[in-house]
Amino acid sequence: MTTVLWNSQVGPRSRAMGVIKRQHCDAQGIGPAAPVSGAIACTKCKGNIKFTVQARSGLTTGRCSTAGCLTWKES
Ligand SMILES: [Zn+2]
């Protein structure tokens, strides 16, 4: 039933999370020693995504500057 759950954010959002994790987490997904915040180019609209990465856990949050575009919070 995965096709039912699919929405237009899934591809670009997972790509954005991948970019951030490659920059700030190691190969096992372990996050940085201290929390990181920053910005990357949006993978959907080429706008500006502001993100955070939690220390150690590597969990990310992100929000595109464009209204209605990508937003996520890992937990
Ligand atoms: Zn965007």
Image (cartoon, rainbow, N blue to C red):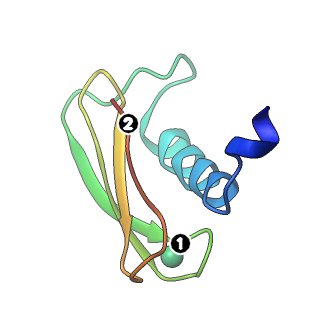
Where does the image place residue 5, in percent across and percent down from the top left? 68, 43
- State which quarter of the image contains the N terminus: top right
Foreground residue among 74 and 24: 74
Say if 68 sits above or below 50 in the image. below
Q: Which of the two discs, 2 and 1, sits closer to the camera?
A: 2
Which residue is pictured at 48% across the width and 48% down the height? 20
Marks 2 and 1, how far apart at CA? 17 Å
Which residue is pictured at 42% across the width and 83% down the height? 66
Query: Residue 42 — which label?
Result: 1
* Image quadrant assignment for residue 27: top right
Foreground residue among 66 and 30: 66
Q: Amino acid at mark 1?
A: Cys
Which residue is pictured at 33% across the width and 48% down the height? 61
Which residue is pictured at 30% across the width and 61% down the height? 38
| Farthest left residue in view | 34
Crowding at dot 1, Cα within 10 Å, few <14 / some 14-19 / many 20+, comes out as many
Helix, strand, or loop for circle 2? loop
Give left or right: position of 70 versus 54: right
Q: Earlier in the sequence, mark 2 or mark 1?
A: 1
Say if 46 sits above or below 53 in the image. below
Foreground residue among 71 and 27: 71
Query: Residue 74 — which label?
Result: 2
Where does the image place residue 4, in percent across and percent down from the top left? 75, 44
Question: CB of mark 2 within 8 Å of CB of mark 1?
Answer: no
* Image quadrant assignment for residue 55: top left
